[in-house]
Image: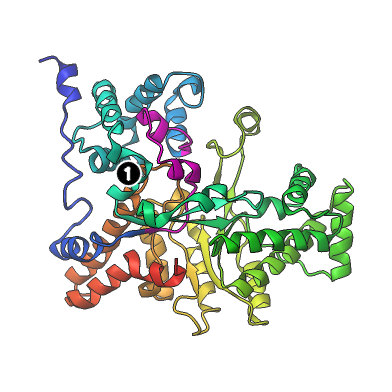
Amino acid sequence: MSTADTASRVKNTFITDNFLLQNKYAEELYHKYAAPQPIIDYHNHLPPAEIVADRQFETISQVWLSGDHYKWRAMRTLGVNERFITGDASDEEKFLAWAKTVPHTLRNPLYHWTHLELKRYFDIDELLNEQSGPEIYKEVNRQLQLKENSCRGLLKQMNVETVCTTEDPLDTLEQHRKYDGKKAGLNMSTAFRPDKAILIEAEGFNAYLNELEDVAKISIATYTDLQDALRQRIDFFHENGCRLCDHGLNQISWAEASEAEIKEIFKKRRGGADLAPQEVEQFKTAILLFLGETYHELGWVQQFHLGALRNNNKRMLAQLGPDTGWDSIGDYSQAEALSNFLNALDSKDKLTKTIIYNLNPSDNEVMATMIGNFNDGSVKGKVQLGSGWWFLDQKDGMEKQMNALSNMGLISCFVGMLTDSRSFLSFPRHEYFRRVLCNLFGQEIASGELPNDMDLVGQTIANISYHNAKEYFNF
């Protein structure tokens, strides 16, 4: 047998039943209390049309590589030509380029995720590399033609109970309205994402409002008109089952202004004029407060993803557009403005359930202490430190987030993991999170820092894995 033939059959010996579980306590916690729990994926970017149609993918490249900027960044770092990433190469050529990249991702979470996903969905126990790539490509494509590997089939394999997609206010929610979750055996909800109506400094702000006018059937000439249009869309989303919003912002804005000032700022921008930085912050503050009070009135959960520095490579942004892998962690000042914003809502008793996701690990403790300021006893875990996301949804990032939350809050109230993904093959990340969680607790039982009371610790694990989210979101 040639070296190439041998390499193509290298056994995957690290994704075992006890992967990431380093002692008997972690093993028991995972297998008995975490693994059996269904998945509530309360924030993702899955395309609802594909769920409704129950799309059957033709190739693994379509379901695994399309839109996955995690993989794209790794391939670019290795020197793979863009043609094999986002270009016109065939699906097979793109997959083989990724297969060639995988061995170079050792110690990057992509190495774990890649083999965990091949194992869980397709029962493939070989390491993916340049030699094994062609056969794995053929085998996975064969399996993708099976009915159980349709979009909803892939989700059901992972015991997914609910998915919550993310839609712009312009969305008609046609797919959500036609979807029958009971018939499909899978719940699908949505989250309202109005960032384009908030980012007043953006080049396309006025063009976006023109589209919002058409959808809401409200002429948006004044700030009051904008509020009315957004309220109309929020009510529409609410009528169609939406109970969450999501905001992807660098940081929370805080710059106070009178109502008259906000109206004048909006009028100025609507007329095509540029704004001073202070005016931008004043507008963002006002619209976020308006939205926050509206969310509270309707009993929604508001989510804030904070800390990304987006679209750094302007040359590649011009070629490929946003969300193609040119973003990084920002180092924004977060605490004071976030405190003022939450306090302004809380002082009126209009602070709804809130999840704050932090992208800069140096701010974990800042955020973990901030949420405690506004947990007022009215709701269990009312204000949450969200799970490690984007660059931090890996073992080290998860552990740091959970340690900060444990040290400065109550991890027992934590609503756990989400994928924040565009891929139907990303759901083993819930398993990955649960294994990291169980190992964290299992190590402290072994060291005597936690009691060897598996009922107590096990119930905490089950709650974080599923029950807390079930109660919190009430889907």
Q: Residue 167 lies in magenta, yes or no?
A: no
Quarter of image, res 370: bottom right
Q: Residue 67 lies in magenta, yes or no?
A: yes
Horizontal and vertical percent position of residue 157 = 28, 48
Residue found 56% across the figure and 60% down from its top = 240
Q: Nearer the viewer, residue 450 or 217?
A: 217
Residue found 69% across the figure and 64% down from its top = 288
Q: Nearer the viewer, residue 357 or 334?
A: 357
What amino acid does circle 1 point to? Leu
Q: Is residue 407 above or below residue 145?
A: below
Residue found 84% across the figure and 70% down from its top = 259
Horizontal and vertical percent position of residue 428 = 31, 48
Q: Is residue 345 above or below residue 165?
A: below
Q: Mark 1 highlights which residue?
A: 154
State which quarter of the image contains the C terminus.
bottom left
State which quarter of the image contains the N terminus.
top left
Range of magenta residues = 40-69
Q: Residue furthest left?
A: 1
Residue 153 horizontal side relative to residue 319, left or right: left
Q: Nearer the viewer, residue 84 or 366?
A: 84
Horizontal and vertical percent position of residue 191 = 55, 57
Q: Nearer the viewer, residue 230 or 4?
A: 230
Residue found 13% across the figure and 63% down from its top = 24
Q: Does any portion of residue 266 appear in the rendered image?
A: yes
Label 1 residue SS: helix
